Amino acid sequence: MTDFIPVNQPLLDGKEKQYLNECIDTGWISSEGPFIQRFESEFAARVNRKHGIAVTNGSAALDAAIVALGIGPGDEVILPTFTIISCAAAIVRAGATPVLVDSDPLTWNMDVSAIAAKITPKSKAIMVVHIYGLPVDLDPVLKLAHQHGLWVIEDAAEMHGQTYKGEPCGSFGDISTFSFYPNKHITTGEGGMLVTNNDALANRCRSLRNLCFQPQKRFIHEELGWNLRMTNLQAALGLAQLERLDEFAARKRRMGQHYTQLLSELPGLELPVAATAYAESIYWVYGIVLKEEVPFDAAEAMRRLGQHQIGTRPFFWGMHEQPVFKKMGLFEGETYPVAERLSRRGFYVPSGMALTPSQVEQVVTAVKNALK
Ligand SMILES: *Cc1c(COP(=O)(O)O)cnc(C)c1O
């Protein structure tokens, strides 16, 4: 019996321990410590942005981005239906309306050709979300946003180290956001970051992160913020991880290519697209979609892989099919067939940073046996 292979395990064998010890030795453990600014400025520089604002997680970064852009009741934001709840939740919590588009069947990213038809006089922003490995085709999105005076929010939570036409993901939005959850390419345990070149937006984000305390009249508030402050301990981890981002991106690409090489012999599987005209996949996770000829769905495949000691996760479930939004009367009668198929037929296999080539081989053997 082989050991269980979890869906994700991070690699923490760089300077993480050294930097964490520095926090303990100096007593700097809150958000006031010196690693915060170092992590913010080095992370922002890495994605060609002027400002980085570290926060508690990637979902909170999206909440702050929406509010910082002044999006609220009466406004519409266009986003993919096939994404994490955080994206739509940020819009709904701000009192605005999410407007959905379907996915591209090959890249699994939002179908950018479907955006134009969704623009109305109420549209305020397009939220692009890079999904699983390949970036969204950004040029058409940026062009539409420019033509219609819309903000672009770029959710780059899965794309540290990825580029679009040679420029870093996270360098394209009016505000771009990242997550540092342990399954992301670099982790702080929990954590997130907003990045922007816009001084005023950066100040808004910093204020929203810190309860909208005012510099002169600290306890008098003109606006409601949150406490979204990252700790120095988390930033210490983040800095140590950031130092290895190139190596981590290369590891992920090798892992993805290894999976594809071994799995492409198997019938019935749709594998991730290795490259588009604008990027090579970074395989944040290695997704598999069961073709119609496979007589069961992703839930059954995952159950069988579990019996073979392989951890898996289902693909995202479309926002238009979320019970919580249906109860709010959102997306009534809307269907997005590509996303619906991905949710039912897709899942991902272990793809964490610590995964070894021999574990990849074990997973592939299990997939062969489980899908017979
Ligand atoms: C992980 C993720 C988030 C949320 O980040 P958390 O840090 O887990 O809150 C948001 N968007 C995308 C696309 C993600 O993958």
Image (spheres, rainbow, N blue to C red):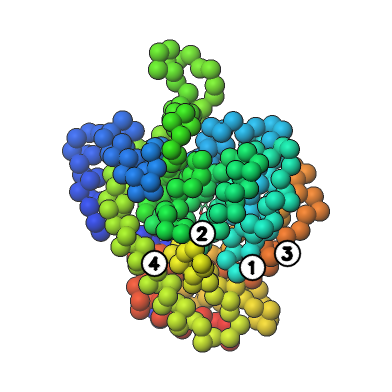
Which comes sooner in the sequence, label 1 or label 3? 1
Q: Quadrant of residue 131?
A: bottom right
Q: Secondary structure at mark 2?
A: loop
* Whole-number angstrom distance, CA of label 1 to CA of label 3: 10 Å
Q: Secondary structure at mark 3?
A: helix
Mark 4 = which residue?
252
Disc 4 residue crowd, few under 14, some 14–19, many 20+, Cα 10 Å: many
Asked if disc 4 is less than 8 Å from ligand 1, the answer is: no
186 and 12: which is toward the camera: 186
How far apart marks 1 and 2 lie (CA) works out to 14 Å
Earlier-in-chain disc, 2 versus 3: 2
Label number found at residue 337 = 3
Circle 1 crowding by C-alpha within 10 Å: few under 14, some 14–19, many from 20: some
Where is residue 365 shown, x and y percent of the image?
Answer: 46, 83
Which residue in the structure is indicated by mark 2?
135
Residue under label 1, please give it. Answer: 105
**Amino acid beneath label 4:** Lys
